[in-house]
Image: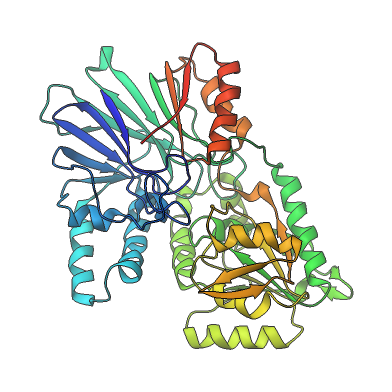
Amino acid sequence: MEILHHGAVGGVTGSCHELRPSADDAVLIDCGLFQGAETSGKGANAHELAIEFPIDHVRALIVTHVHIDHVGRIPYLLAAGFGGPIYCTPPSAKLLPVVLEDALKIGVTRNKALIRKVMAKLERMIRPLPFGQWQTIETRGDTPLAIRFQRAGHILGSAWVDCRLGDTDKAQHVVFSGDLGNRETPILRPPDQPEGCDVLVMESTYGDRNHEGRERRQQALEDVLRHALSDRGTVLIPAFSIGRTQELLYELEDILHRNRGSEAANGLAWDAVEIVLDSPMAAKFTHLYRELRPYWDDEARARVDEGRHPLDFEQLTTIDSHEDHLHAIDYLAKTERPVVVLAASGMCAGGRIVNYLKAMLGNPKHDVLFVGYQARGTPGRDIQTYGPKGGYVDLDGERFDIRAGVHTISGYSAHADQQALVAFVRDMRRLPAEVRLIHGDPEASEALARILRTIVPETRVATAAP
């Protein structure tokens, strides 16, 4: 058995891992896009999109979840000749075609006929696999291989993967964590706990820090909004179209619901605060999230039963057309309308959030609120780092001074923190012989490795290498 890493090593993007039960067979776990400074498997400054490793022996692609840094290179995998099944959970099977069609339009081609052809092929390849159900992978070698998904609690449909190598009575188990979420993430059921495994390949995004609890982070969100709205400016929240946007809408609806009829700031009623979702992709995914209500957690479904609409409430406005988007920016930049804007991309590397930033970063009455991880080399990381120091950011080759307020709430990360990652390992009934840490900056991975070596000394812990 061999495990190879084709991405998310020494960084947090480009997830792609190869499990080889024998010399004749392999499966890929994710095939994601590199982002920011991490534009190749080794972090070099070159856009690595083509699949540069052999795939003749790859029997299946296993998708842990549909974020672009885990699925964005799938079109290139097909171009390289892969034609096997793509296994993912039922919610991911519904979300994945939307993600990949958008990725094709933005990064590959505008040829509608070609896009239709690729999408038709992709949809034939996708195999929805329910949580907890074993699926045998067809192999040519003499080592049987089966996989099953368990809930990861990162975004709707996200999973960690249990790979069973060999006969069931003496099988070897390799677990790939995918991206693990917080136990308190809104809408989502909590991550499942593995009983045990032989090898664990685990993310380490926040391996060096802990998050605030949900009650505290929701209060922090409310406090930042009160402060930001006090000067009648716009609050810009860069957010991933999938997962983070829906989580924030859910929390914002709750803040508005609890504070109905009360004051937000300086005579401004919460009832007068408008929430704007300016992201066609996020609007599509929010609609799909509503359709996937059976996969919501008990709290979210109970709110719907009470007559509330956590993802489609009265004070929510969705902007679709580009013309309306430009009009909204012009209007909000000139008026004192208290508005909270959610727009992609989450790391400010593209999308409609960039136009808002260009128009509003230079005005101190506006605020930028980060609620998600900002990878090295992205404009989001630069704004987060240099904004509080009165610095500047480069957007589309142009320098913009940062005079707007800059805030960060770490607790809204969709990634598990250090204590949750430690518990994922420590609470196994059968501890792994080996833990390989991936999907983290070197400092985060090393910090997590140190604490794991102390807590589970019998387990060999290492940071993965390409």
Residue placed at 67% from the left, 37% from the top? Answer: 210
Which residue is at the front of the view, 20 or 124? Answer: 20
- Percent of width and height locating residue 68: 40, 56
- Image: 302 above or below 144: below
Q: Is residue 201 left or right of residue 134?
A: right
Circle count:
0
Residue placed at 74% from the left, 87% from the top? Answer: 335
Q: Quadrant of the C terminus?
A: top left
Which residue is at the front of the view, 350 or 85? Answer: 350
Q: Quadrant of the N terminus?
A: top left
Q: Is residue 300 left or right of residue 20?
A: right
Residue 228 figure quarter:
bottom right
- Image: 98 above or below 40: below
Residue 214 figure quarter:
top right
Q: How is the image coloured?
A: rainbow
**Residue 315 can be seen, yes or no:** no
**Residue 186 can be seen, yes or no:** yes
Which residue is at the front of the view, 326 or 135? Answer: 326
- Percent of width and height locating residue 87: 28, 44
Residue 234 figure quarter:
bottom right
- Percent of width and height locating residue 425: 52, 23
- Image: 144 above or below 214: above
Which residue is at the front of the view, 447 or 296? Answer: 447
Residue closest to the far front: 45
- Percent of width and height locating residue 264: 83, 68
Residue placed at 34% from the left, 45% from the top? Answer: 30
